[in-house]
Image: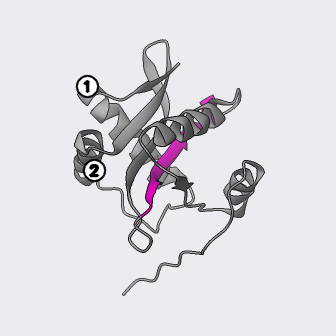
Amino acid sequence: MIREAVQEDVSRIVEMGSRSLREGPYSGMIADVPAQSQRLAEQVMSAPGGTILLSDEDGSATGLIAFIVCAHPFSGETVATELMWYVEPEHRPGGIGMRLLWEAEKLAKEKGALKMQFTAPTSQIGDIYRRFGYRKIEETFLKEL
């Protein structure tokens, strides 16, 4: 089942975020700061255009997609911007990630978004986006200062 997150889900959201940062493609590049992840989750859930959707299996969240609907800084168009999309590896078979994506697109459109944008930390994830009609618009780089 896909559902919107509530305050009681924040600790589980933080757990999944930490796992993603420790084990995923951002490992060693973006610090895992659980207190900041908690603040972010609470801010997204309380923002007018913010949403965190959870995949829920038997009362346990196994994946999430978080996004915010806002005015694009250049065009002013209403867009949805993904902040995080993660499904725990042991729950990825079965299409939970795709169901989260489709529900996020539907809800973003209901909130007035004309477009939705995602980051792709790997080319494999970029290929998933392409299969669903997304176009590559930029690459992101990070350097220690």
Q: Residues within 10 Å of mark 2 (few under 14, many from 20)?
A: some
CA gap between label 1 and label 2 equals 15 Å
Q: Residue at x 43, y 14 (%)?
A: 59
Q: Please name the residue that numbered disc 1 is placed on.
A: 8
Q: How many numbered marks does the figure carry?
A: 2
Seen from the viewer's position, the closer of residues 10 and 145 is 10
Q: Which residues are magenta?
A: 77-91
Q: Can you name the residue that lies furthest to the top here?
A: 58
Is 9 a magenta residue? no
Q: First in sequence, mark 1 or 2: give its number.
A: 1
Q: Residues within 10 Å of mark 1 (few under 14, many from 20)?
A: few
Seen from the viewer's position, the closer of residues 79 and 141 is 79
Q: Which label sits on residue 89? A: none
Q: Residue at x 52, y 38 (%)?
A: 104
Chief SS of the magenta region = strand
Seen from the viewer's position, the closer of residues 95 and 16 is 95
Picture coordinates of residue 66, whole percent (x, y): 43, 44
The C terminus is located in which quarter?
A: bottom left
Secondary element under disc 1, as helix, strand or loop, is: helix
Name the residue type under label 2: Leu
Is 84 a magenta residue? yes
Name the residue type under label 1: Glu
Q: Please name the residue that numbered disc 2 is placed on.
A: 40
Asked if labels 2 and 1 touch by Cβ distance under 8 angstroms, the answer is no
- Horizontal arrangement in the rendering, residue 13 relative to residue 55 (left or right): left
- Horizontal arrangement in the rendering, residue 61 relative to residue 7 (left or right): right
Picture coordinates of residue 108, whole percent (x, y): 47, 42
Q: Residue at x 41, y 83 (%)?
A: 144
Q: Can you name the residue that lies furthest to the bottom here?
A: 145
Secondary element under disc 2, as helix, strand or loop, is: helix
Q: Which quadrant of the view contains residue 105?
A: top right
Picture coordinates of residue 134, whole percent (x, y): 68, 57
